[in-house]
Image (spheres, rainbow, N blue to C red):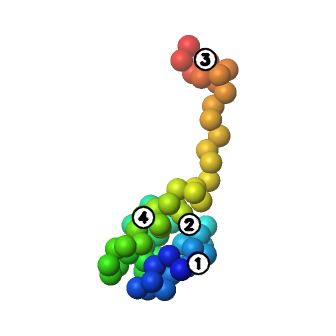
């Protein structure tokens, strides 16, 4: 699916940039070229970024209890 029509950036391009290390909207746009012209795509790019982030494991209750003493 095309996310940015101005620069013809697809959702695959966005995901590839995230897999390549882009972690912020500015980094994804810098790598892919999305969002440079009209800016209409930035919400879609941000959504893809949020969906594609790697989940961080939450600490267990035991770890929290031992850390807080």
In which image quadrant can residue 17 be found?
A: bottom right
Q: Residue 41: give x, y in percent of width and height.
A: 42, 72
Tell me the CA gap for discs 2 and 4: 16 Å
Q: Is residue 41 left or right of residue 60?
A: left
Tell me the CA gap for discs 3 and 4: 39 Å
Above or below: residue 30 compared with residue 21: below
| Residue carrying label 2 | 18
Of the pair 56 and 5, the residue shown nearer to us: 5
Tell me the CA gap for discs 2 and 1: 16 Å
Q: Residue 39: give x, y in percent of width and height.
A: 34, 74
Quarter of the C terminus within the rendering: top right
Residue at 40% in and 68% down: 42
| Residue carrying label 4 | 43
Tell me the CA gap for discs 1 and 3: 46 Å
The mark closer to the camera, 2 or 1, is 1
Residue at 61% in and 18% down: 66
Q: Is label 1 in a helix, a strand or a loop?
A: loop
Of the residues under marks 4 and 1, which one precedes in the sequence? 1
Of the residues under marks 3 and 4, which one precedes in the sequence? 4
Of the residues under marks 2 and 4, which one precedes in the sequence? 2
Above or below: residue 55 compared with residue 41: above
Res 30 seen here? no
Residue at 60% in and 17% down: 65
């Amino acid at each position: 699916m095309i996310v940015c029509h101005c620069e013809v950036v697809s959702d695959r391009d966005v995901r590839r940039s995230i897999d390549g290390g882009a972690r912020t909207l500015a980094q994804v746009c810098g790598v892919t070229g999305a969002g440079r012209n009209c800016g209409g795509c930035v919400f879609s790019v941000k959504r893809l970024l949020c969906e594609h982030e790697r989940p961080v494991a939450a600490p267990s209750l035991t770890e929290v209890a031992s850390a807080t003493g």
